[in-house]
Image (spheres, helix red, strand yellow):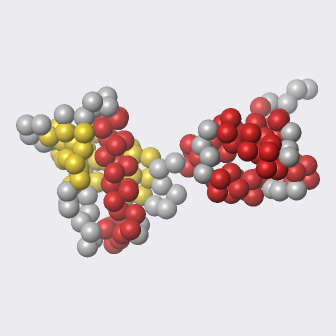
Amino acid sequence: MAQSLFEYEAEFIKNLKSTTGKDFQEWLDLIEASKLTDKSAICNWLKKEFKIDYSPAYKLSNLFLEDQKLNAPKVLFSGNLRSGTVEYESKEGSFKMISEMGAYDVLAIIDVPTEDRWESVTNLPLEKRESILHYIGQKTVEKQTMGSGSYEIKSNCIKIKS
């Protein structure tokens, strides 16, 4: 009987250590450390640096990118942007914020914890606050304004603009 794709990938991952000398997590760590994000570039790098054949290099490239996508931070919306919640989820932690309708060129305002409350509310390090807020702003504009808006980060909110 033919293997399903899932069974094939599971067997591939299980046999990596014996066929390549490294287990799956070691490969993921090496690829992540390379900072490469393009499937072809990762595949070529694996072939060149580690002298592995095309097939396992290609499979590792695909699995790495799938893993990155599954574990990427997410911004989730409930209700609607004008009256609801915005939730940030990542491997490091998650937290919810309230959104409310704005006025004039401001479509919505997302309440965010101030710097002095950031760590106690989010359980995330203060040094990550700026990059997380930019990520939330970018994803909100992308998902809620069809990409045609902009955002502005203030001390206690993110303004989503038209």
Which quadrant would the C terminus be assigned to in this image?
A: top left
Residue that protrudes farthest toward the top in the picture: 1
Q: Position of residue 39 (x, y in %)?
A: 66, 37
Q: Does residue 36 lie above or below 132 as drawn?
A: above
State left or right for residue 133 relative to residue 45.
left
Residue that protrudes farthest toward the left in the picture: 104
Residue at coordinates 44% horizontally, 46% vertically from top-left? 74
Q: Is residue 71 visible?
A: yes
Q: Position of residue 107 (x, y in %)?
A: 17, 38
In terms of depth relative to the viewer, which is nearer, 110 or 45?
45
Q: Is residue 14 visible?
A: no
Residue at coordinates 68% horizontally, 35% vertically from top-left? 40
Residue that protrudes farthest toward the front in the picture: 48
Q: Does residue 70 lie above or below 93 as drawn?
A: above
Q: Quadrant of residue 2?
A: top right
State left or right for residue 6 relative to residue 15.
left
Q: Position of residue 101 (x, y in %)?
A: 15, 41
Residue at coordinates 33% horizontally, 54% vertically from top-left? 133
- Number of dots carrying numbers: 0
Which quadrant would the N terminus be assigned to in this image?
A: top right
Q: Position of residue 25 (x, y in %)?
A: 73, 56
